[in-house]
Image (tube, rainbow, N blue to C red):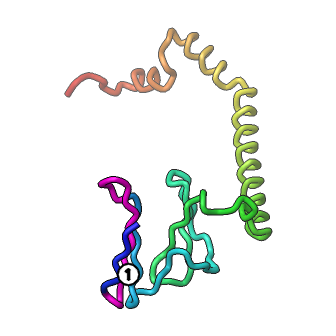
Amino acid sequence: MLIDARHREETRIAVVKGNRIEEFDFESAERKQLKGNIYLAKVTRVEPSLQAAFIDYGGNRHGFLAFSEIHPDYYQIPKEDRDALLREEAEHAAEEAALRADYDSDDEEGDDEDDIERFEDDGGVDPDVADELEGGEETGEA
């Protein structure tokens, strides 16, 4: 471990293994140390791909907190947020069920089968197209 304390306003520490620096840290009298302190903060965004959360601790920037740094006892959703989440999930499930029921009822009516039968009865020509052709509209190239 190497410690550089030549300057009163800054202390630098390096952990060296062989010719490689394994760890480096510094403290400055001019800058307030943020790392290692305890703050009361609010999670503003969870980023699963980074396995981390962004937190608002009252500083000029958001903090970054790795999931591995959070004790498992703190993995909880506040009651108000949990209730809102459950309501939103229930609403979403109800909307999906209504859409599925509407789609299933359309299939039961047999409209598609009636259209196919009419299509086959007319010799394979869509009735709308047949009406246009009989109406004298030109369908050729201009």
Residue extent of the magenta highlight: 7-21
Is 120 placed above or below 81 here? above
Tell whether 41 sits left or right of 59.
right
- Dot 1 falls on a residue whose secondary structure is strand
Residue to which mark 1 is pinned: 11
At label 1, counting other C-alpha atoms closer than 10 Å, the crowd grade (few under 14, some 14-19, many 20 or more) is some
Foreground pick, 73 / 30 = 30
Main SS, magenta region, reads strand
x and y percentages locating residue 7 in the rendered image: 31, 87
Locate the C terminus and report the quarter of the image it occupies. Answer: top left
Residue drawn at the location 50% of the way across and 11% of the way down: 124
For badge 1, the amino acid type reads Thr
Residue 114 highlighted magenta (yes or no): no
Is 63 placed above or below 60 here? above
Residue drawn at the location 34% of the way across and 59% of the way down: 21
x and y percentages locating residue 84 in the rendered image: 75, 65
Find residue 108 and report its image quarter: top right
x and y percentages locating residue 47 in the rendered image: 54, 58
Tell whether 12 sits left or right of 34.
left
